Image (cartoon, grey):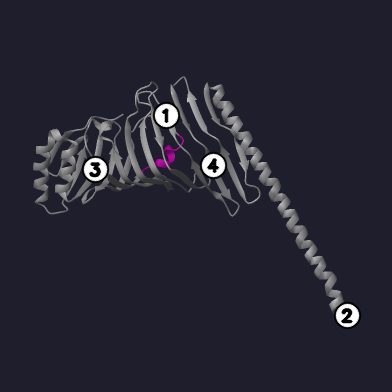
């Protein structure tokens, strides 16, 4: 027998064991996939049953788990929540969340509108969008990152009677991202082409607005999952809050906190670009204060096209530069 004849059985055995290993591995994966799918259905049913025992109606209609073998997809036809005791209700369209086999801890979820809400003390709302998507980086005990992107946002009232709804706002796009940073929570968000309907703000007129923000909630991780009943003792670091329209821009940065007595303390810096344009916007939004606004911003314009001033609040007493603004009421 030649050496080549001896190698052929060995190569066949090697191929056999490789195929056998792949089959076993796929069988284990399949068992795990279907176990997890069944676990999702079971836990969803338990959660709904627990809420129902508390008098809360909630549901994910026609819950489906699919996508085998390459994806893990959870979907339902609509979402609903109703708490008669607290007179709270919310509903939305279809929900779909997909995790790929190559990135199982990075699911992508989408939700179809409209979102309809009813909360005591607020008019019922109808909020809709063209596209709403969430991306999550899962980890334990908290996700590494949660981000949300929306396009074609709009909002209006949702009257229970036959009266016409009131248009509230529309925005071309909006996004937000939340992630832990040690014991704190970082938030970054923005929106573009926000238009607020004049009827929603008493006939006042505002141009289309763009905004962005970058804020840290100190000790925010400890607050996750707790029912925060008061803002007292909380603090934030505002790295940047920016609101603009055309050439007009207002930027705010600095720390802000609420002490145990509910008094606000802040050491902020306000930067204004094109004070005359900012004044024109404010005068249109607050016409009864037009003269005072124009006079104040005319003085600011003397400091240049991009003046800045400190906004300080000490124990609720606010001042803009050397100008006292009065005292803020304690917050709860």
Residue at 43% in and 39% down: 222
Look at the image and tell me in which quarter the N terminus lies: bottom right
Answer whether residue 42 is magenta in the image.
no
In this view, 158 is above or below 104? above
Q: Earlier in the sequence, mark 4 or mark 2?
A: 2
Answer whether residue 220 is magenta in the image.
yes
Q: Is residue 9 left or right of residue 49?
A: right
Q: Is residue 170 visible?
A: yes
Q: In what element is the residue under mark 2? A: loop
The image quarter containing residue 259 is top left
Q: In what element is the residue under mark 4? A: strand
Q: Which residue is mark 4?
A: 96
| Label 1 neighbour load within 10 Å: few <14, some 14-19, many 20+ | many
Q: Which residue is mark 3?
A: 207
Residue 5 percent across, percent down from the top left = 87, 76
Residue at 36% in and 35% down: 155
Q: Earlier in the sequence, mark 3 or mark 1?
A: 1
Circles 4 and 1, Cβ within 8 Å, touching? The answer is no
| Label 3 neighbour load within 10 Å: few <14, some 14-19, many 20+ | some
Q: Which residue is mark 2?
A: 2
Circles 1 and 2, Cβ within 8 Å, touching? The answer is no
| Distance of label 4 from label 2 (alpha carbons) | 61 Å
Q: Earlier in the sequence, mark 4 or mark 1?
A: 4
Q: Nearer the viewer, mark 4 or mark 2?
A: 4
| Distance of label 4 from label 1 (alpha carbons) | 20 Å
Residue 24 percent across, percent down from the top left = 75, 54
In this view, 168 is above or below 277? above
Q: In what element is the residue under mark 3? A: loop
Q: Nearer the viewer, mark 2 or mark 3?
A: 3
Residues shaded magenta: 217-225
């Amino acid at each position: 027998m030649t050496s080549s004849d001896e190698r052929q059985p060995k190569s066949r055995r090697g191929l056999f064991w490789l195929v056998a290993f792949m089959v076993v591995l796929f069988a284990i994966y399949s068992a795990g996939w279907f176990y997890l799918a069944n676990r999702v259905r079971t836990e969803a049913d338990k959660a709904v049953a627990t809420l129902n025992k508390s008098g809360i109606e909630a549901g994910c209609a026609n819950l489906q788990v699919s996508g085998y073998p390459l994806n893990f997809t959870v979907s339902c036809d609509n979402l609903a929540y109703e708490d008669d005791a607290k007179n709270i209700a919310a509903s939305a369209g279809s929900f779909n969340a997909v995790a790929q086999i190559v990135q199982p801890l990075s699911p992508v979820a989408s939700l179809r509108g409209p979102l309809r809400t009813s909360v005591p003390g607020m008019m019922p709302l109808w909020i809709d969008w063209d596209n709403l998507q969430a991306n999550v980086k899962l980890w334990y005990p908290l996700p590494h990152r949660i981000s949300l992107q929306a396009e074609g946002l709009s909002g209006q009232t949702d009257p229970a009677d036959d009266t016409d709804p009131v248009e509230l706002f529309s925005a071309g796009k909006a996004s937000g991202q939340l992630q832990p940073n040690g014991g704190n929570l970082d938030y970054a968000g923005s929106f573009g082409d926000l238009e607020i309907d004049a009827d929603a703000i008493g006939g006042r007129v505002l141009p289309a607005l763009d905004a962005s923000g970058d804020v840290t909630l100190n000790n925010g991780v400890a607050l996750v999952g707790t029912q925060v009943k008061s803002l007292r003792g909380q603090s934030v670091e505002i790295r940047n809050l920016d609101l603009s329209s055309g050439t007009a821009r207002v930027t705010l940065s600095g720390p802000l906190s609420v002490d145990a007595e509910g008094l606000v303390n802040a050491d902020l810096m306000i930067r204004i670009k094109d004070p005359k344009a900012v004044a024109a916007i404010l005068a249109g939004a607050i016409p009864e204060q037009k003269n005072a606004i124009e006079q104040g911003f005319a003085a600011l314009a003397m400091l240049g096209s991009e003046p800045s001033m400190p906004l300080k609040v000490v124990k609720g007493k606010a001042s803009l530069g050397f100008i006292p603004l009065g005292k803020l009421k304690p917050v709860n």
